[in-house]
Image: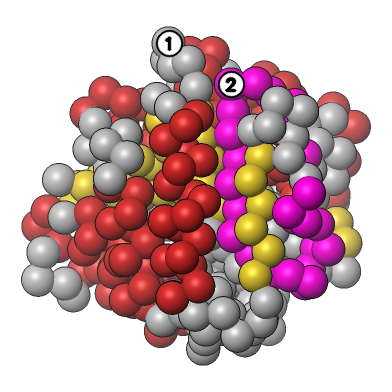
Amino acid sequence: MISIIYSDEFLDHDTGIYHPEKAARLTAIVEALKQTEWQSKLTWHLPTPLEIRDEVIPLIKQVHNQDYVDRLRRICQQGGGRLDADTPVSTRSYDVALLAVSGWLDGVDRVLSTSDPTFILARPPGHHATSNYGMGFCLFSNAAIAAYYALENKRVQKVAILDWDVHHGNGTQDIVENHPQIAYCSLHQFPFYPGTGEAREKGEFNNVLNIPLPSGSTIKDYQEHFEGQVIPFLKNFQPDLVIVSAGYDANQADPLAGICLHPQDYGILTKYLLTLNKPLLFGLEGGYDLETLAASVVATLEALL
């Protein structure tokens, strides 16, 4: 079985009708999953209510500056606004972002207690959110917060984060690169937004692996790097938990990038991860062509089944 953590409340983060990171992303995925022949093998879970998860705010403040958290909350309470030119927030965005973090923590709980793969179908995404500010559609660094939570609350010794979103997860790297118990690996288009993620960035403990890829790269390029770098890096680190920042904007049809993957290719990448024989936690990041986004999530889960 595969657990899906999802709530309709994630649709309430209102970015505006023309913004690519919109609620329709989630509804497209949900509808696609409900139409699969194997939908009965998915178990759907609501994220734990915030009033029960008292640790959400303290965990967020471990990785994010207090001034930033307060600023985000204040902007939302005042009716919304923008964190930067790309990152609008609405009245409910702060609360929804908190619930998304709660969903990621639930994912850690579930995958470590059952060893079954878990997919967090939440928004807003997180991998561009640094310690001090949100950017690139992202508010809180969901994957990094989940990694800290696993280390501090689940008797986990090491966590690896694999980021296959087409954009480099500058926020995730910013938060974890100096933590010896967290490894970060990213495959991303380069040079490209946000301008970070050069191969020379290794982390304080040689715990960062960046694989910059030119526009036009295909699944053959990804397979070469998975076999030659990604899987050996992860195996050498020996994590107790693997978190996947699962962005799907490296699809050829995606309007925001230039990598040439196809939905079925994410099934291939997922099968590589299965060779690690480690608990796998997936959380949604980018992906802005609705049809290929939904099909890519289906391909990921189908490979896990």
Measure how far apart labels 1 and 2 are at the Cα level: 12 Å
- Quarter of the figure with residue 14: bottom right
Q: Residues within 10 Å of mark 1 (few under 14, many from 20)?
A: few
Question: Regarding mark 2 in the picture, which secondary structure is present there?
Answer: loop
What span is in magenta? 174-200
Q: Residue at x 78, y 45 (%)?
A: 201
Q: Which residue is mark 2?
A: 181
Work out whether 105 lies above or below 46. Answer: above
The type of residue carrying mark 1 is Arg
Considering depth in this image, is 290 or 241 the residue closer to the camera?
241
Q: Residue at x 42, y 56 (%)?
A: 227
Q: How far across and down, in percent of the image, does residue 45 sit?
A: 29, 43
- Quarter of the figure with residue 172: top right
- 99 left or right of 90? left
The N terminus: image quadrant:
top left
Q: Residue at x 9, y 57 (%)?
A: 40
Q: How far across and down, in percent of the image, does residue 162 sit?
A: 52, 47
Considering depth in this image, is 48 or 167 the residue closer to the camera?
167
Considering depth in this image, is 78 or 151 the residue closer to the camera?
151
Q: Is residue 12 visible?
A: no
The type of residue carrying mark 2 is Gln
Q: How far across and down, in percent of the image, does residue 88 sit?
A: 78, 64
Q: Is residue 136 magenta?
A: no
- 48 left or right of 199? left
Q: Which residue is mark 1?
A: 155
